[in-house]
Image (cartoon, rainbow, N blue to C red):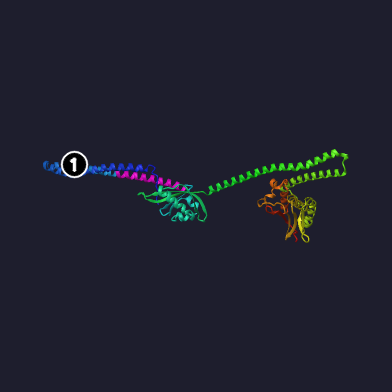
């Protein structure tokens, strides 16, 4: 396989040399012509002169003729030798220039960061550079003789065919296009390729050479940048979400604080007005209102402190082996009055026999209280069922209600901090949005997990699992 080498002025040197050679040949031809004429006509002239002038004159003419012939042939030899020497020197000079040009071209060929290879008309690789060898993991000898189609995955063959038909056959070169090559170990690498056809002296296609640029690192960089942009967008969305949650938290906490503080303020004002003129019943009612307001404020502060401890990993547990059924029964009993006031039922499905769990009872009571309080808040008809089940090594608590339920897309989100359902669907039953987040943190601190089973309009069943009796 050959290739076109840029002339770098060598073509002009060859033309100048041809002109000079042509001139020297013309001179040599003239000398030979004169010598031939002299050699042809001078002997006859000498013979005629000798017949008229005698022997002495003949010998003198013959000597002159001999000198003349020697001079002519010496001149011809000198011209010939000078022409031959000049041609030899110029040829050696041109060969040196060609050698240097080829060395420069070979250096560029081998030092190229892009892969370069040459093929014949059938696509067999005749030569390739080191970059192409390293790119595909073959040796140079392994690549020589195989076709570029053998290095191309089958799903890219049609792309190569389209480029040949639409570009190479029309213009003799292709635009840069994307494809893949297969490495020696079968991996695919993305590349950008350009192809040029080269012709022989008659103008017929003799083969092609291709330049191949490995796009693996570029694509990896683009993927990295794309992923980075996605992460930044997600972080920005999260920051916007946190900003929204902060605004909502301020509003909700303000609302939660306003109600008990208002009740406390009203009760204190009433006590100032009534003073000693109020009945014991009135004073007792005012004290109950004050107590509820204080408790509500206390719960809000406790919730804020708990979520802070959970997020900082400072939530401390005091686990011990307790009867989970007794624990849940106590919590259910504490809610019976509130359920009765609302006119709905609460039932406790107590398991037969003891159901032991290894937990911090105060914290598990807090989780059950949060779940039952939520069920009470969102259930207007029907009732709530609290149940306990045990599996080898685990204890499962469940609180099921007959409320509006939760769509599946909220099953994970409902446990996020400050999450609250849309006010349009809760009829003003929103809270600060910490109860379920705190419950999740407490359960996970026990090496358990919490989940919800629900559908829109089908009620909700919140369950959590914690370790049971390790000796059971």
The residue at the far left in this view is 52
From the viewer's perspective, tell me whether residue 116 is left or right of residue 454.
Answer: left
Q: Nearer the viewer, residue 71 or 298?
A: 298
The tally of labels here is: 1
Q: Quadrant of residue 77?
A: top left
Where's the C terminus, which quadrant? Answer: bottom right
Residue 94 colored magenta? yes
Residue in the image at 65% along x and 43% along y: 240
Q: Nearer the viewer, residue 20 or 410?
A: 410
Query: What segment carries the magenta color?
Result: 82-110
Q: Is residue 23 above or below residue 123?
A: above
Q: Quadrant of residue 233?
A: top right
**In the rendering, at what x and y percent does residue 115 appear?**
47, 49
Label 1: how many residues lie within 10 Å, few (<14), some (14-19) or many (20+)? few
For mark 1, give the secondary structure: helix
Q: Is residue 78 visible?
A: no
**In the rendering, at what x and y percent does residue 180 appear?**
50, 52
The residue to which callout 1 is attached is 64
Q: Is residue 226 visible?
A: yes
Q: Quadrant of residue 65?
A: top left
Residue 135 colored magenta? no
**In the rendering, at what x and y percent does residue 409 appear?**
65, 51
Q: Is residue 278 above or below residue 145?
A: above
**In the rendering, at what x and y percent does residue 23 appear?**
28, 41
The residue at the far right in this view is 276
Q: Nearer the viewer, residue 393 or 367?
A: 367
* Main secondary-structure element of the magenta-colored stretch: helix
């Amino acid at each position: 396989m050959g290739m076109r080498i840029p002339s770098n002025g060598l073509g002009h040197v060859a033309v100048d040399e041809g002109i000079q050679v042509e001139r020297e040949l013309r001179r040599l031809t003239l000398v030979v012509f004169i010598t031939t004429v002299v050699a042809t006509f001078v002997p006859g002239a000498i013979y005629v002169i000798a017949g008229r002038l005698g022997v002495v004159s003949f010998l003198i003419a013959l000597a002159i003729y001999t000198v003349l012939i020697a001079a002519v042939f010496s001149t011809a030899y000198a011209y010939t030798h000078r022409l031959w020497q000049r041609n030899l020197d110029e040829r050696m000079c041109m060969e040196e220039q060609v050698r240097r040009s080829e060395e420069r071209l070979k250096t560029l060929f081998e030092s190229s960061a892009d892969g370069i290879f040459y093929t014949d008309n059938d696509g067999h690789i005749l030569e390739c550079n080191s970059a192409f060898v390293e790119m595909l993991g073959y040796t140079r000898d392994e690549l020589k003789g195989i076709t570029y189609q053998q290095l191309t995955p089958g799903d890219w063959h049609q792309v190569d065919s389209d480029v040949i038909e639409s570009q190479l056959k029309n213009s003799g070169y292709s635009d840069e296009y994307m494809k893949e090559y297969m490495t020696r170990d079968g991996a695919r690498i993305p590349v950008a390729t350009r192809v040029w056809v080269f012709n022989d002296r008659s103008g017929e296609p003799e083969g092609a050479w291709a330049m191949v640029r490995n796009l693996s690192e570029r694509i990896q960089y683009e993927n990295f940048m794309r992923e980075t942009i996605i992460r930044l967008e997600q972080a920005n969305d999260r920051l916007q979400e946190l900003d929204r949650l902060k605004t909502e938290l301020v509003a909700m906490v303000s609302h939660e604080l306003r109600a008990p503080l208002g009740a406390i303020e009203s009760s204190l004002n009433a006590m100032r007005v009534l003073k000693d003129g109020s009945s014991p019943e009135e004073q007792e009612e005012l004290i109950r209102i004050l107590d509820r307001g204080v408790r509500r404020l206390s719960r809000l502060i406790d919730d804020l402190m708990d979520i802070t401890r959970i997020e900082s990993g400072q939530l401390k547990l005091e686990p011990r082996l307790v009867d989970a059924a007794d624990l849940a029964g106590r919590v259910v009993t504490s809610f019976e009055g509130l359920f009765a006031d609302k006119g709905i039922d609460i039932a406790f499905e107590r398991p037969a026999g003891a159901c032991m769990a290894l937990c911090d009872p105060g914290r598990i009571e807090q989780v059950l209280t949060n779940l039952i309080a939520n069920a009470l808040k969102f259930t207007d008809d029907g009732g709530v069922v609290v149940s306990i089940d045990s599996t080898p090594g685990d204890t499962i608590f469940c609180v099921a209600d007959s409320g509006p339920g939760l769509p599946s897309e909220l099953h994970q989100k409902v446990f996020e901090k400050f999450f609250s359902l849309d006010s349009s669907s809760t009829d003003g039953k929103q809270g600060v949005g910490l109860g379920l987040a705190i419950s999740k943190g407490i359960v996970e601190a026990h090496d358990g997990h919490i989940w919800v089973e629900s559908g829109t309009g089908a009620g909700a069943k919140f369950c959590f699992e914690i370790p049971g009796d390790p000796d059971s």
